[in-house]
Amino acid sequence: MARNRHASIWTRVSGAPEKMGDLVLSEDQTAFTYTSDYLASGQPGFCLLGDVRIWGNESVSYPISERIPVFPRLLSLVPGNNPRNLQRRHYLDILRATLGREPPPGPETEWRLLVMGGHGGIGHVDVFSDDISAQAWYGSNTPTPPMGTTTAVSKSRSQLWRMLKRNVLDENVEFDPRVIEQTLGPTPSVGGMIPKLLVSMTPGDAQANLYPPETPDRRDVVLKIEPPEYAGLLDLEALCLEIHREAGFPVPAYARYEADGLQFLAVERFDRSAGRPIPMESLFSVIATGDHLFRETGDILLEELGGVIQRLRQVATLPEDTGAQLYRRILMALLTGNGDLHLDNLAFLGGLSDCRLAPVYDPAPMRAWPRHNLVSAIPFDPSGYADHGTFFVELGRSFGLSRDQVKKDIDDALDATSDYSERVMDLPRVPVQQRSQLAEIAKKECRLLLPYTD
Ligand SMILES: Nc1ncnc2c1ncn2[C@@H]1O[C@H](COP(=O)(O)OP(=O)(O)OP(=O)(O)O)[C@@H](O)[C@H]1O
Ligand SMILES: [Mg+2]
């Protein structure tokens, strides 16, 4: 019989590190038990539907599957399984060196990756192999001096750039992983398909110097690095962030950098406030924790999301207009050619008592690339509608919106994107094929919604 695996979950949600509880993984389920101190503290749980207020003294449990082999909330702390994921490469290198052989693919290795890289990431949950490792990590996790002033420091900058050139641009250059580790620390896992680092930066620094997260007087950012197979992606993503900002959506500060042949998009982190982590959980995680049969984005329909918000309202305090906000984001995704608004690209911030939608992130218009040209990553059933334009109009009703409100939201989204195609065509770094494909798609979606306005 397989052995149980144990880990410890800590948090700095109160401003200081404290243990939240113990995590156990057995062959067919995972369980989490809060410490009595944490139970008494009244602080947010490790995930919304695993909150202390719902489970009390009982252990929170979840039946694992091949697709979701840990609590859904912890999935984003395991480095994404794609060849460009910088953290996965880094941790596999360390594991290879420790084991003296190739780490076997499968749950054993995934668990090791979780306990190695599952702290200091997005949100307030830190996973460690045990309490001693937790205390050691918090004790040593004091920011190192900035790079770029001494010889040693410029050496580390050049090593870091070599690492990115090798791992993201596939250039045949060598780098010393130990220097990267000394400079940035073991960089925490972060989800998503595009290579990225959690670092801090100085706004406006044309050199794009990188510092470890939480360096004083810098801004903590999610730093995305453009891989060659998606040339122009970061310009398109920045344009879509801008369009959402102009339309009045909450959007984090962001900046584009180009340094030494590498393209960066730095997006300020909104899961931190005055140095404290804010709970953050994807819609994917909330749905999967609540529905044990749910395994992937394709297991729910767009028209069911309004009901999900209603059910969440039974346990969490959510702003009145959450459904409306979600509908507006779906309309913007449709009109900007972002077919990739999946359930990990939508998230909640806060705990049960102060839960709200996270600002807009990752609005990249992936339909510019033929292999991502899907109307919506979250499936929908357009049968019974004249075209999918009519479906997206009717969708507003499933979020509890009146016909007048739906019409206003469509007007606003069309206004916000009225010059989108021209702005796409004006981006010189984006290959012409991607620009024209995207501009055509955006115009077509716009034509489908136009009949529903005055
Ligand atoms: N500004 C931010 N503040 C806090 N967390 C963020 C921010 N931006 C992104 N994240 C988190 O990092 C994750 C990965 O970021 P993002 O979605 O931008 O990457 P991606 O590689 O483009 O993803 P995808 O696989 O959807 O294309 C997000 O799912 C979210 O949890
Ligand atoms: Mg994403």
Image: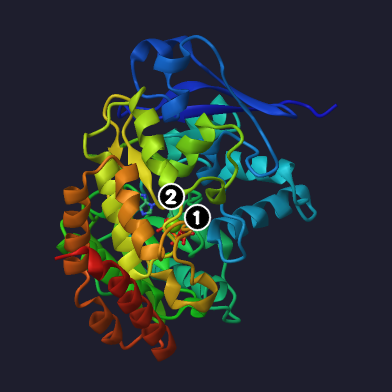
The residue drawn where x is 47% and y is 24% is 50
- Label disc, if present, on residue 379 of the rendered structure: 1
Q: How many marks?
A: 2
Residue 144 in percent (x, y) is at 37, 51
Is there CB contact under 8 Å for labels 2 and 1? yes
Residue 145 position (above or below residue 31): below
Residue 435 in percent (x, y) is at 37, 84
Applied colour scheme: rainbow
Number of residues whose C-alpha sits closer than 10 Å to that of mark 1, classed few (under 14), some (14–19) or many (20 or more): some
At label 2, the amino acid type is: Leu
Please state which of residues 209 and 225 is positioned toward the viewer in this rendering.
225
Please state which of residues 399 and 186 is positioned toward the viewer in this rendering.
399
The residue drawn where x is 24% and y is 84% is 422
Please say whether residue 360 is visible from this viewpoint.
no
Q: Secondary structure at mark 1?
A: loop
In this rendering, position of residue 301 left or right of residue 243: right
The residue drawn where x is 56% and y is 59% is 178
- The residue wearing badge 2 is 302
Ligand 2 occupies quarter: bottom left
Residue 194 position (above or below residue 137): below
In this rendering, position of residue 414 left or right of residue 330: left
At label 1, the amino acid type is: Pro
Please say whether residue 310 is visible from this viewpoint.
yes
In this rendering, position of residue 2 left or right of residue 52: right
Residue 283 in percent (x, y) is at 43, 42
Residue 115 position (above or below residue 255): above
